[in-house]
Image (cartoon, rainbow, N blue to C red):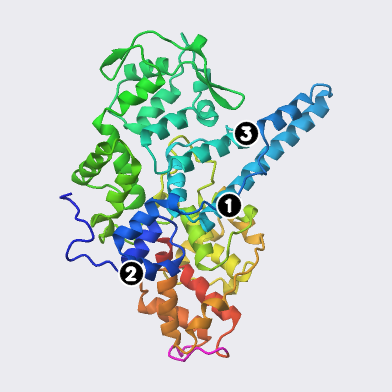
Amino acid sequence: MSTFLAPTDKGFSWNQVAARHLLNRAGFGVPLSKVDEMVSAGPTQCVGALIEYEHFDDNLEATDFVTSLAEYAEKRRALAGLTPEERQRANNEIQRQQRQEIEKLKGWWIGAMVNTTRPLQEKMALFWHGHFATSAQEIKQPIHNLQLNTVFRTHATGNFRELVFAVGKTPAMLEYLDNKSNRKGSPNENWARELMELFTMGIGNYTEADIKEAARAFSGFTERGGEFYFDEKNHDFGSKTFLGRTGEFDGKDVVDIIFEQPETARFISRKIWQYFAYENPSDELVTELAAVFRGANYELKPLLRAIFLSREFYSTRAMQGQIKSPAQYIVMLAGQLGYGVPRAELVSLAMRGLGQDLFYPPNVKGWPGNRAWINTNTLLLRYNIPAYILVGERPPQGRTLALDEVAPAREMAEGEDTPAARRARVAAKRTPRPADVIAHYRPLQGKTATQVVDSLAWTFLGRPITPTQRASVAQVLMGGPDTNAVLTAASYDNTRAASALHLLLSTPEYQLC
């Protein structure tokens, strides 16, 4: 490829920084213990191991807490003999149970990201969740949300054409975009429109007439009993003209024609590059990626391999400049602190406050991402979450430390009465179990305070910090101005150690990966 050379070419430096960048972007940045092993293995082998993750046992936990459709149907049948008041109470209880199961699904998925042996699979499932967005606000059945999530995971790095068709047949998508009510003579255009606009080609590559004809082709695509069902009675078998082709097309034909369009490969290649590397890639780069994608018949693995083995992926523009998504932030924080999986209710509160409420994307476009993750409310919560994990409680105001660079944003958000700010304050009242703070300092005894801070900065930030930042953190750690003092078991305590680490995790640099 001419635009970006392979990192195995002469002059490319495959080192800890590059390996960590791959670990961050193709997964969730943990475990850091893998970095030295990755440097020794080389980029080709590392990328191969990430992409060919089927070689690793799947440790995904069971979701036996999700109630089946049959059980919910039985509950609803039992309403028949009740009074209106009793029926209302019983319906409220069913809805409460459904909401609780969605909350458990959030914690389960974050747990899967924290513990996965297949980080790229989970990272791609998260990408598809934002790309093919549906919301549990409308899709009430937890099992339907889980089914779509399973499709994302099953097809995470498979064939994109097959993924598109599989998503379109899920009860969640059929309901969310109303195709379950798409009938001959009264076509519903929602799925057909979003299929082209958001999921495959992008605006400007089809006409309103194409949307109408595609909607006819998908008529009769519905569901029964929680499974896809092709209703022949309500399917329009007539001739249709779509993207310049004419025939008695059905939904599969429409998808096949979409994948004949060159812009489909360009649209998805650009979006996946932006997810893993940086925004607004050059047309030349997108053209070359699209050629790889089309040449592989829309198999995702060759495209991902081309991205992760490109020199441009390791360029200055690409590295350490992406704002962590809330999922990336929570998973990396938990993994780096050795915390394990946070409680499901804490995960739900944190993710909602940070702006990425899993299973509840804001609309069919999903989350905008990157800079949209940061505002005064979400930034405040990003600065406070480490404190809850480090000490197991919200520190007194005098100990809620922040560097000069971040203090103004905290002060702006502290008194606000917005929904996000209120959620942040609710989260602050929860008391998670504390992390083992001293474990991060024990191996560093015998070093000076500034050396300790530099080591922690590499561990948690992956980059050096400024002299002012280093001095601030070191002074907090030592409880005084002597930052050249040697760290010993007697020279620091858990409170100062936690405060120093909290300060480091409250830097602007920690929000990036």
**Which amino acid type corresponds to the residue marked 2 in the rendered image?**
Ser
* Left or right of 266, for residue 339: right
**Amino acid found under the numbered disc labelled 3:** Gln
Residue under numbered circle 2 = 40
Tell me: residue 29, above or below residue 256: below
| Location of residue 131 with respect to 23 vertically, above or below | above
Q: From which residue to which does the magenta span run?
A: 481-489
Give the residue pinned by disc 1.
417
Using a 10 Å C-alpha cutoff, classify the residue at mark 1 as few (fewer than 14 neighbours), some (14 to 19) or many (20 or more).
few
Task: Name the secondary structure under disc 3.
Answer: loop
Q: Looking at the image, is mark 3 or mark 2 earlier in the sequence?
A: 2
Q: Nearer the viewer, mark 3 or mark 2?
A: 2
Q: Amino acid at mark 1?
A: Asp
Q: Residue 141: which disc?
A: 3
Label 2: which secondary element: helix
Tell me which numbered mark, 1 or 2, is placed earlier along the sequence.
Answer: 2
**Residue 409 placement (x, y as % from top left):** 46, 62
